[in-house]
Amino acid sequence: MKTLKLFLSTAVLGTLAMGCTQEAEKPSEPKTLRQAYQDAFYIGTALNRFQIEESDSVMAEIVGKEFSSITAENMMKSMHIHPKRDTFNFEMADKFVALGEKYDMFVHGHTLVWHSQLSPWFGTIEDSLEFADATEKHIKDIASKYKGKIDSWDVVNEALNEDGSLRNSIFLQKMGEDYLASAFKWAAEADNGADLYYNDYNMTNPEKRQGAIAMVKNILDQGVKVDGIGMQGHWHLNSPSLEEIEQSILDYSALGVKVAITELDVSVLPNPWDLEGAEISQNFENSEGMNPYKDGLPDSIQVKLANRYKDIFSLFLKHKDKISRVTFWGVSDGQSWLNGFPIRGRTNYPLLFDRDLKPKAAYDSIMALKERFDEQQLAN
Ligand code: G3I
């Protein structure tokens, strides 16, 4: 649990405390991502079961030192945490929260209401009122158990279609569109101190963006608390454009809510959906063309990835007053879900640490960017 965001970097604090001594004139080198970005926004990562249990000491050290926020990649989804209607399994979630406390991190809960990885018992409830009661209990039991320990929640995840209309999920079918405001209301009743987010992917797509804005505005207009919008950053080397990302940050922020960049990873592999007329089929599974870097990432692509991260982090820094948190969807390339999506068995390189847990050029690029940013701030 983290209650206070540090707005002054250690370097600046040090300078103020020491006055104008020779040492104070030299800002100390940022050593980790967490330290470098502590005055901008939380830098988070998603953790799998092994990382939560700190099974690998090198990985554990990276997590503890490099990140100031954590999200459980899967372990707080309903199928894991609430496997039967009358049975919760809090074991991994408890360990996850304890890890956040150990490293004094901002702990994010993912996710209370999501149609996917949904515990099967939801689907067995026929009656609409009973379904709504069960959903309320699900939200309240979990959010109140972690009251004061989870700093923010993805209350509703991925409720929108690409055209901005509401996804025809089991929640919409059973409860109508009121389920959205109800979910946020119930979460706030359980833990009013946690920041409550709506989280979705392709949030830079203009149609979906308009749908998200209308949806969140509708909830806010009912007097129900929504604190933030999570833009999942499952992005590519060339898309979405920086203009689309920036416009989205501005548009969401104009609602008066925080913006979090959640689930950030940049795929370097070809996207079969970009191919005109292409259909996802088994044919792609063994296609060499769809898995071009299985023996290693060429330097030219490593540089492109580093530049892409530099560009998007420049935007994040430009709008740091609007951004609460930037969370990577994993620590190292080897753990990324993108090795299995949208085609299974590929070798992708979307994160900041490589398969040997060494920092990549992308890591260096956003560290160097922040150093330059700080120098400019000091110069102004
Ligand atoms: O735990 C089992 C393991 O026992 C089994 O051996 C293995 C065999 O495939 O499967 C394991 O479960 C997988 C689980 O990830 C843990 O690795 C599931 O099959 C797999 O479906 C699941 O995928 C997760 C996916 O959500 C499910 O929708 C990804 O890890 C996770 O990164 C991904 O995260 C989502 C966000 O929650 C919401 N936004 C999109 C994002 C990417 O899809």
Image (cartoon, rainbow, N blue to C red):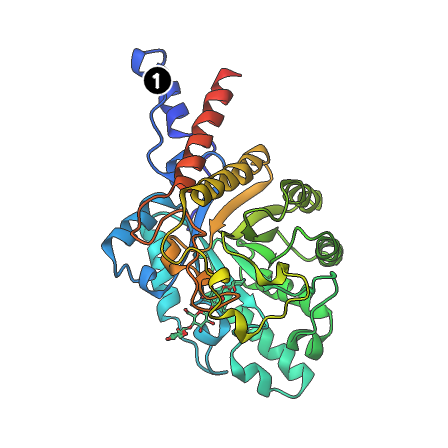
State left or right for residue 77 relative to residue 27. right
Look at the numbered disc 1 and say if its residue's Cβ is closer than 8 Å to ligand 1.
no
Pick whichever, 106 or 166, lies toward us.
Answer: 166
Whether residue 283 sits left or right of residue 184 in the image: it is left
User: Does the rendering let one see residue 17?
Assistant: yes
Would you place residue 167 above or below residue 228 in this image?
below
Quadrant of the image occupied by residue 131: bottom right
Work out whether residue 37 can be spotted.
no
Looking at the picture, tell me which residue is in the foreground, 292 or 303: 292
- Viewer-proximal residue among 135 and 62: 62
Residue 216: % across, % down: 70, 56
Three-letter code for the amino acid on which mark 1 is drawn = Lys
Structural crowding at the residue carrying mark 1, measured as other residues with C-alpha within 10 Å and reported as few (<14), some (14–19) or many (≥20): few
Q: Secondary structure at mark 1?
A: loop
Q: Residue furthest left?
A: 57
Residue located at (54% from left, 57% from top): 270
Q: Quadrant of ligand 1?
A: bottom left
For residue 268, above or below residue 341: above
Residue 213 rendering spot, x and y as whole percentages: 72, 53
Give the image location of residue 345, x and y in percent.
42, 67
Give the side of residue 136 with respect to residue 69, left or right. right
For label 1, the residue is: 26
Q: Is residue 257 above or below residue 366?
A: below
Residue at left 52%, top 41%?
308
| Number of numbered tags placed on the structure image | 1
Give the percent coordinates (x, y) of residue 81: 44, 73
